[in-house]
Image (cartoon, rainbow, N blue to C red):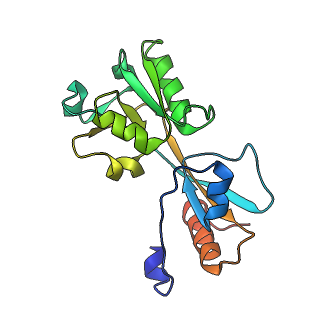
Amino acid sequence: MFNQNYPQIELTIHPITTRTRWEMVYSADLLLTPCDFGLHPRPDVESTLLTTQQPLVALPPQHSLGSRQEIQLEDLKGENLIVPFANEIFGPYARNAMAAYRKCHSQIRRIEAEDAQTGLLMVEFGKGLMLIPHHLKHRVYPHTRTVLITDPDCIFPIYAYWNRSEDNPAADLLYETLYKDFHGKKS
């Protein structure tokens, strides 16, 4: 929609995966992420929760759950769950892993991964499975299957972070447009 309304503005989208949270925010004019940095607000950064996504589970090739359309967290009992950014205890991957742990009555093993792409590679090699947001579906490896998780308490939020210290009118306009699309008019 933004491209249709503002064809004169060229958007360039780059995945950022290996920086600290504030390096990510300050290296981009506008950052979209499933991570809530709101616990440590900064005066030069504005943020908003845009939406939430029901997660998918990325499954290794030939996994028995791969033939299903949707599953619940309790279906993961006895599995190895790969958790990227596991040290970020308030991050979405760790929160969803904890929800799976509770639903499976502690009968799930957690394997830490440095980042999401490393976790997806581990899935492809059959080391375990991983809960992912929908926008990562296009980054799974060729033989990995994805299935929808239906538990309402298992979600990936999507936040927008706008670096107000940068002089970038296009990024300002994109942030305002996203905010209006998801929340209505800003006050």
Q: Picture coordinates of residue 2 (x, y %)?
A: 48, 75
Q: Position of residue 161 (x, y in %)?
A: 64, 59
Q: Residue shown at 35%/19% (left/top)? A: 79
- The picture places residue 74, in percent across and down from the top left corner, at 38, 20
Q: Is residue 43 left or right of residue 159?
A: right
Residue 70, image quadrant: top left
Residue 34 coordinates in the image, percent (x, y): 54, 47
In this picture, is 10 found above or below 131? below
- Given residues 18 and 72, the one toward you in this image is 18
Q: Which residue is painted at 54% across and 37% down in the image?
A: 85
Q: Is residue 55 visible?
A: no
Q: Quadrant of residue 3?
A: bottom left
Towards the viewer: 158 or 126: 126
User: Which of the pair 94/155 is nearer the observer?
Assistant: 94
> Residue placed at 50% from the left, 83% from the top?
6
Q: Is residue 79 above or below residue 19?
A: above
Question: How many numbered marks are there?
Answer: 0
Compared with 26, 11 (above or below) is below
Q: In this image, 154 relative to 185: left or right?
A: left
The image quadrant where one finds the N terminus is bottom left
Q: Which image quadrant is residue 30 in?
A: bottom right
Up-down: is 59 above or below 136? above
Q: Quadrant of the C terminus?
A: bottom right
Residue drawn at (39%, 33%) of the image: 130
Please identify the residue farthest to the bottom as the structure is shown.
8
* Residue 104 visible: yes
